[in-house]
Amino acid sequence: MNKLYYLSSCSTCKRIINQWSLTKAIDLIDVKKTALDEKNLKELYKITNSYETLFNKRAQMLKKLNLKINLLDENDFKRLLLSHYSFLKRPVLLFNRKIFVGNSKKNVEEAEFELIKK
């Protein structure tokens, strides 16, 4: 199933969504309204083989919880991803069994190319 995990209040996510040619065949999931659950996280993990890849290392919650990235392991990343929406690096596009995580220019362009290819 094709999915886009994003945050509706994030201007970067909005800009990227407008840039991409999204079809109705992609489920849009606002992570603030629909929390990431174990099943969906497992689906993403199967492709990335890393919770750290899915983790937003710039999340403000890291400072609030006084967490140090270099001291976290995969179990910590998983636990945190399930605990609060802000820990998910956004946007996350799952399309045609490929995953695109984050908002780097290269990643956004690769995802856009894949979406156009269909």
Image: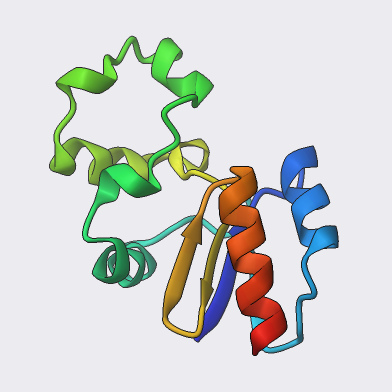
Snapshot quadrant of residue 52: top left
How many marks the image carries: the answer is 0
| Location of residue 48 by image quarter | bottom left
In the picture, which quadrant includes the C terminus?
Answer: bottom right
| Looking at the image, residue 83 lies above or below residue 40 | above
Q: Nearer the viewer, residue 62 or 15?
A: 15
Whether residue 58 is visible: yes
**Residue at horizontal 43 percent and vertical 12 percent from the top:** 63
Question: Is 25 on the left-hand or right-hand side of 72?
Answer: right
Taking the image as shown, residue 83 lies to the left or right of residue 22, namely: left
Left or right: residue 106 compared with residue 44: right
Q: Is residue 23 above or below residue 99?
A: below
Q: Give the image location of residue 28, x and y in percent.
A: 67, 70
From where the camera sits, is residue 31 visible?
no
The chosen color scheme is: rainbow
User: Which x, y percent locates residue 56?
Assistant: 45, 35
Residue at 67% over, 48% down: 7
Residue 93 in the image, given as x and y percentages of width and height? 55, 66
Position of 40 with respect to 74 (left or right) is right
Above or below, comparing residue 83 to residue 43 in the picture: above
Between 48 and 79, the residue placed more toward the observer is: 48
Name above or below for residue 34 compared with residue 65: below
Q: Residue at x 66, y 86 (%)?
A: 117
Q: Position of residue 24 (x, y in %)?
A: 75, 87
